[in-house]
């Protein structure tokens, strides 16, 4: 950790962390600049000192090499404010809507991974079941899995929340979506929740949710498409834009109610954050970062030509595949190279245009 660039041990490009601290991103193993700064920052985070940072500090940390978030400035800024207000004892209820692979969940994974242990909990909301019904993923089981001293002061991130709003009817005509939303309403009211012992041999549980923040994440694909093309309904014969071309307009509480959210629950949301797809530039940077990560993992250079990165980024954007596909595709390509030559001193992936074979054949004529 260094307080000025003049104290660095090498002259490489430096990155700035909050509070004017610099570190060297040099990737050579054993480099003292990187090891000391990252280690000290991880220790500060583990000690819970991050809750003393300003919102701007948290946003800068998310965009740093340690936080690892590329693009989505508005969403990172919103997440920083949510975290800051949470530790200032101003819990909130927020909703992040954006396409698959845009980084909604990754922002909160980064905060959970590097934050004080037990503060951020990410739950797959698509598997939530109502209390009293079969299923292991209930609100009560979520709180039982959290340390008792953290239950009333945690950030609950409900991933795939848009699935909760879709009607789910049982054999008797019961809409399970309404039951789950009724229980979430009390949580978002920051009320005290009471859970009985049930049939799983657990004791009764009460949780004061006055200090619990709730973050809902979802793609809301149909809603975003409807907003993007400016139509009230999407039906047969409607021409929709490719997934990656949709630009999300502002989503309102009324939109959420029409989508299936109960008005009482929608009225408790303090902040709605709309996220667009990552840009070509963002996806190229993600691909480059993934290649750098694989270089460190394999202990040998992994080089992907700029044209190849741009080609992959265009595919990911046009098909709405996002950052996860970009990383997975690069990993698959490198695995194919390792299969062919596991002892190669370096792995290089070049871009070939679609007519490359035709050009080669013409050269031999």
Image (tube, grey):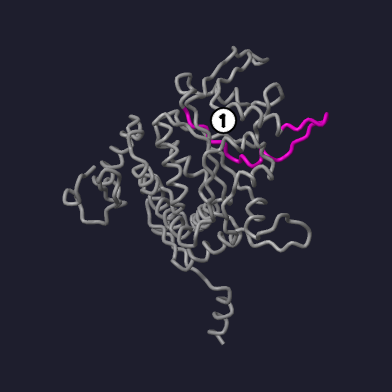
Q: Is residue 195 above or below residue 85?
A: above
Q: Pointer 1: what residue?
A: 188
Q: For residue 169, which quarter of the picture?
A: top right
Outermost residue toward the bottom in this view: 365
Q: Main secondary structure of the magenta part?
A: loop
Horizontal and vertical percent for residue 267? 60, 37
Q: Is residue 319 magenta?
A: no
Residues in magenta?
154-176
Horizontal and vertical percent for residue 341? 47, 57
Which quadrant does the N terminus fall into?
top left
Horizontal and vertical percent for residue 114? 40, 37
Question: Along the horizontal axis of the image, is 175 left or right of 105?
Answer: right
Residue at the image position 44 percent from the left and 47 percent from the top: 76
Q: Is residue 172 magenta?
A: yes
Q: Which type of secondary structure does the marked residue at label 1 adopt?
A: helix
Q: Is residue 344 above or below residue 46?
A: below
């Amino acid at each position: 950790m260094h307080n000025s660039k003049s104290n660095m041990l090498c002259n490489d490009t430096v990155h700035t962390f909050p509070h004017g601290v610099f570190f060297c991103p040099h990737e050579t193993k054993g480099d003292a600049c990187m090891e000391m700064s990252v280690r000290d920052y991880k220790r500060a985070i583990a000690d819970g000192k991050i809750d003393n940072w300003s919102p701007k500090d948290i946003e800068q940390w998310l965009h740093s090499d340690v936080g690892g978030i590329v693009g989505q400035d508005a969403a990172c800024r919103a997440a920083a404010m949510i975290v800051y207000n949470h530790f200032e004892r101003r819990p909130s209820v927020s909703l992040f809507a954006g396409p698959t692979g845009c980084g909604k969940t990754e922002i909160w994974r980064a905060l959970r991974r590097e934050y004080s242990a037990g503060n951020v909990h990410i739950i797959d909301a698509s598997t939530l079941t109502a209390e009293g019904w079969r299923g292991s993923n209930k609100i009560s089981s979520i709180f039982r899995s959290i340390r008792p001293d953290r239950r009333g002061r945690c950030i609950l991130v409900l991933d795939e929340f848009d699935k909760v709003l879709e009607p789910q009817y049982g054999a008797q005509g019961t809409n399970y979506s309404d039951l789950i939303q009724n229980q979430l309403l009390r949580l978002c009211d920051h009320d005290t929740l009471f859970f009985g012992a049930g049939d799983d041999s657990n004791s009764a549980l009460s949780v004061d949710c006055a200090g619990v923040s709730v973050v809902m994440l979802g793609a809301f694909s149909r809603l975003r498409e409807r907003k993007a093309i400016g139509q009230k309904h999407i039906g047969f014969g409607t021409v929709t834009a490719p997934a990656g071309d949709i630009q999300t307009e502002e989503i309102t509480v009324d939109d959420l109610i029409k989508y299936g959210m109960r008005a009482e629950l929608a009225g408790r949301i303090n902040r709605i954050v709309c996220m667009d797809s990552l840009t070509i530039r963002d996806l190229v940077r993600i691909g480059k970062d993934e290649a750098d990560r694989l270089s460190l993992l394999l202990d040998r250079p992994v080089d992907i030509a700029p044209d190849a990165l741009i080609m992959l980024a265009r595919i990911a954007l046009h098909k709405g595949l996002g950052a996860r596909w970009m990383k997975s595709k690069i990993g698959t390509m490198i695995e194919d190279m390792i299969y062919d030559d596991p002892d190669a001193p370096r792995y290089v992936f070049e871009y070939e245009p679609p007519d490359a074979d035709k050009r080669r054949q013409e050269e031999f004529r």
